[in-house]
């Protein structure tokens, strides 16, 4: 059974998480099926999430474009394009996917499982788009838009801090506070194929935030985000 493979993280539980019940639940299973699983199980390639991801990407771009167009009547085309790109890029969608613990529901081949695929930004961000595509096919644009509004376009103030955390932090510290800062690798753990990096961001010898990630860049992004939250609480933003 596919549900056994996910160790209790069933499609029914995922439906509750996303707030949408499928008429054709096979679409949701397909959205959660990585190509490594179909290859290993000798299932037709068309049954993995790649085609749904293609569709979901287009739906997401349209809904996000309309949202930004309506919410920012004075913003230029170039600014809108840049803002949309930051909101639907791989790290941003992975951030949204982790709110849903989407990686825990995925069907992965053993190789991908053993190399940390459930936590990989590229995989969970693709799965997020595949879920959007699946909802669109099953329930139409209104249902897909409702999902995007709830899980991608909500809490945008905090998410925007995360999306551009490293550049935002540099702007705040060097531009506004006129200070210097640095990232420091605190710890590197795990086997070579599944490393975990722990990083701090420091200013004037004090830690502003720490972060963890499968890459140094991801850990730095999380550390920068936490530093921004701290600086915002202090009234520096």
Image (cartoon, rainbow, N blue to C red):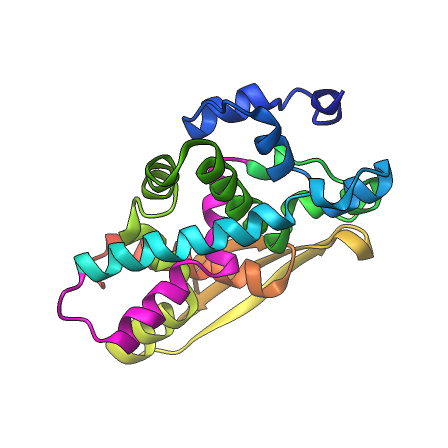
Residue 46 percent location from the top left of the image: 71, 45
Q: Is residue 152 magenta?
A: no
Q: Quadrant of residue 25?
A: top right
Residue most extreme to the left: 74
Res. 68 in view? yes
Tell me which residue sits at (48%, 32%) in the image: 138
Q: Quadrant of the C terminus?
A: bottom left
Residue 157 percent location from the top left of the image: 27, 53
Q: Residue 221 versus residue 188: which sits nearer the camera?
A: 221
Stretch of the chain drawn in magenta: 72-101
Q: Residue 217 versus residue 134: which sits nearer the camera?
A: 134
Residue 70 percent location from the top left of the image: 18, 57
- Relative height, residue 14 to residue 177 (above, below): above
Res. 164 in view? no
Q: Quadrant of residue 1?
A: top right
Q: Is residue 97 magenta?
A: yes
Tell me which residue sits at (78%, 46%) in the image: 36
Q: Residue 54 versus residue 168: which sits nearer the camera?
A: 54
Tell me which residue sits at (38%, 38%) in the image: 147
- Mainly helix, strand or loop, the magenta region? helix
- Relative height, residue 202 to residue 71 (above, below): below
Q: Name the side, left or right, on which 187 lies relative to 77.
A: right
Q: Name the side, left or right, on which 47 lies relative to 143.
A: right
Tell me which residue sits at (62%, 22%) in the image: 10
């Amino acid at each position: 059974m596919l549900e056994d493979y996910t160790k209790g993280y069933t499609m029914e539980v995922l439906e509750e998480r996303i707030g949408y019940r499928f008429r054709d639940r096979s679409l949701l299973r397909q959205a959660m099926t990585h190509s490594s699983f179909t290859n290993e199980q000798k299932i037709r390639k068309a049954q993995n999430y790649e085609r749904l991801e293609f569709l979901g990407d287009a739906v997401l771009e349209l809904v996000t474009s309309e949202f930004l167009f309506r919410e920012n009547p004075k913003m230029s085309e170039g600014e809108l394009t840049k803002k949309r790109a930051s909101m639907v890029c791989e790290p941003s969608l992975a951030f949204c996917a982790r709110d849903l613990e989407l990686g825990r529901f995925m069907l992965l081949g053993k190789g991908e499982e053993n190399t940390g695929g459930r936590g990989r930004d590229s995989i969970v961000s693709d799965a997020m788009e595949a879920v959007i595509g699946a909802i669109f096919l099953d329930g139409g644009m209104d249902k897909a838009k409702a999902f995007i509004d709830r899980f991608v376009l909500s809490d945008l103030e905090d998410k925007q801090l995360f999306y551009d955390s490293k550049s935002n932090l540099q702007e705040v510290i060097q531009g506004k506070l006129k200070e210097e800062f640095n990232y420091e690798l605190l710890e590197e753990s795990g086997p070579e194929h599944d490393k975990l990096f722990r990083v701090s961001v420091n200013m004037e010898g004090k830690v502003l935030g720490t972060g963890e990630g499968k890459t140094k860049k991801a850990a730095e992004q999380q550390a920068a985000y936490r530093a921004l939250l701290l600086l915002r609480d202090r009234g520096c933003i």
